[in-house]
Amino acid sequence: MLVKTFGSAVYGIEATTITVEVNIAAGTKYFIVGLPDVAIKESYFRIESALKNCNYKMPRQQVVVNMAPADIRKEGSAYDLTIATAVLAASGQLQSDELEKYIIMGELSLDGGLQPIKGALPIAIQARKEGFKGFILPKQNAREAAIVNDLEVYGIENIKEVVDFFSGDTTLERTLVNTREEFYNSLCNYASDFSEVKGQENIKRALEIAAAGGHNVILIGPPGAGKTMLAKRMPSIMPPLSLQESLETTKIHSVAGKLAAADALVTTRPFRSPHHTISDVALVGGGGNPQPGEISLAHNGVLFLDELPEFKRTVLEVMRQPLEERRVTISRARFTVDYPSSFMLVASMNPCPCGYYNHPEKDCVCPPGVVQKYLSKVSGPLLDRIDLHVEVTPVNFNELTSERIAEKSEAIRDRVIKARDIQIARFGNETDMHANAQMTTKVLREVCKISDAGQNLLKKAMEKLGLSARAYDRILKVARTIADLAGSPDIQIEHLAEAIQFRSLDREGWAGN
């Protein structure tokens, strides 16, 4: 008897429906075809044990499982439930006309229980697009799939529930999520706030500019000056996620298996802080079975690289293209996948190995030449792509013990939102441009016109600091953001001057050169 059930494969952040055909005929042995990987071939043993422990039988005849389309590589253990349901139906232990109306996915335990899967959200989106009635999957993934409207989502705990559901012996409780209510209830719910940071007003100003224009920023200063503390509070002053951004971010985290069972949506800006021992593949994504890397998990949020010179040079260099294109393309012989990676880079570093170069009170003990060698670990091309270079100085005792309450993140965020609204109106006709940092050269020339006095100031800055053409463009973008924060329609000379001071740590200005 031939039976069809349906599963799904995820490539990049998009899903493709997979048809699982099971035919039982006279003979022996179990065959599975359609380019399955080792995990799928091993499914026979999991399925057999799960069926036996739930009082069902594995047929002792020839069982042929075909996974179509047969020219696409199938990977992972999430097809266990799809195959097991088809085997039960083909062997007459399950009788239903509803099987072909549902996507069925889940990894089986030997006792018939279900383990969570990855990519439930893109699978649910594709299922609705193709007109399926519902989606049956492990209970741990039910909430993330249920944010898709017009699709019946049922979270189950074991295979017996599936059999009883299709046999009509029981009804399953449908998982319902009010997407908009879930989204708005958790918006801007951050544990940390800028009001907890004592002093550092100039650094807060730099981060406000970065958030307002989507600019990359590097913080350089001695240990204990507050670089990490400031960086961790960066998402709290960024504009709230839109519902579209939230869904896009949730898809990436769903594919990577990073969503908790209680979560339906990613409602706050992601903050990713990988350790400096990370590999280049883990950072940008890839592998034999391509998975999104840290820069894609930071999409629509912040990627924080602490102790930047400690990262391997190859790891830092692979970020250069994604920083410009805001997308990662991973190519293999048989397919290519794209992962979005529109993130804000926030990096921090010590000025030297001992950490006290240029410290107002402590002396640097590094030998001659070591400081420049240490700083040179960050390449010029990467540094060029960072808009704001900010020197962080230690907080003095009086500021640290002051009872004065600092400005809250909410107040800073309101100013940032107003500046972003100006930018959104400015780039209304551009589909991939929402912030000043994303401006193309053509748009930059149109919206960043400056006076002759401003041109002279920029000329002197470029000659003195040895800035590149890319740095020139980035100064204009930062100046445009400063003008937006001030509500000015034109870039004034004071806006340019403030933007230029954030390039003072550029290559020729480092280590006192």
Image (tube, rainbow, N blue to C red):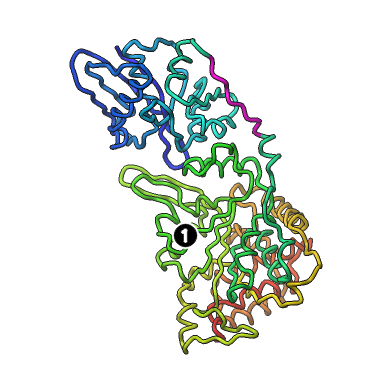
Q: How many marks?
A: 1
Does residue 467 belong to the magenta stretch?
no
Q: In the image, is residue 46 above or below residue 168? A: below
Q: Residue at x 79, y 71 (%)?
A: 402
User: Considering depth in this image, is 173 or 339 the residue closer to the camera?
Assistant: 173
**Image quadrant occupied by the C terminus:** bottom right
Q: Position of residue 121 (x, y in %)?
A: 52, 35
State the residue lying farthest toward the bottom: 368
Q: Quadrant of residue 36?
A: top left
Q: Position of residue 416 (x, y in %)?
A: 73, 57
Q: Residue at x 68, y 56 (%)?
A: 192
Residue position marked by numbered label 1 in the rendering:
321
Q: In the image, is residue 148 above or below residue 3? A: below
**Where are the magenta residues, as a range?**
171-179
Mark 1 crowdedness (10 Å alpha carbons): few <14, some 14-19, many ≥20: few
Kind of element beneath mark 1: helix
Q: Position of residue 118 (x, y in %)?
A: 45, 38
Q: Residue at x 63, y 58 (%)?
A: 214
State the residue lying farthest toward the right: 404
Does residue 174 belong to the magenta stretch?
yes
User: Considering depth in this image, is 129 or 479 the residue closer to the camera?
Assistant: 129
Left or right of 89, for residue 320: right
Q: In the image, is residue 392 above or below residue 327? A: below
**Image quadrant occupied by the N terminus:** top left
Circle 1: residue type: Gln
**Main SS of residues in magenta:** loop
Left or right of 417, for residue 439: left
Q: In the image, is residue 347 above or below residue 299? A: below
Left or right of 223, for residue 15: left
Q: Position of residue 157 (x, y in %)?
A: 48, 26
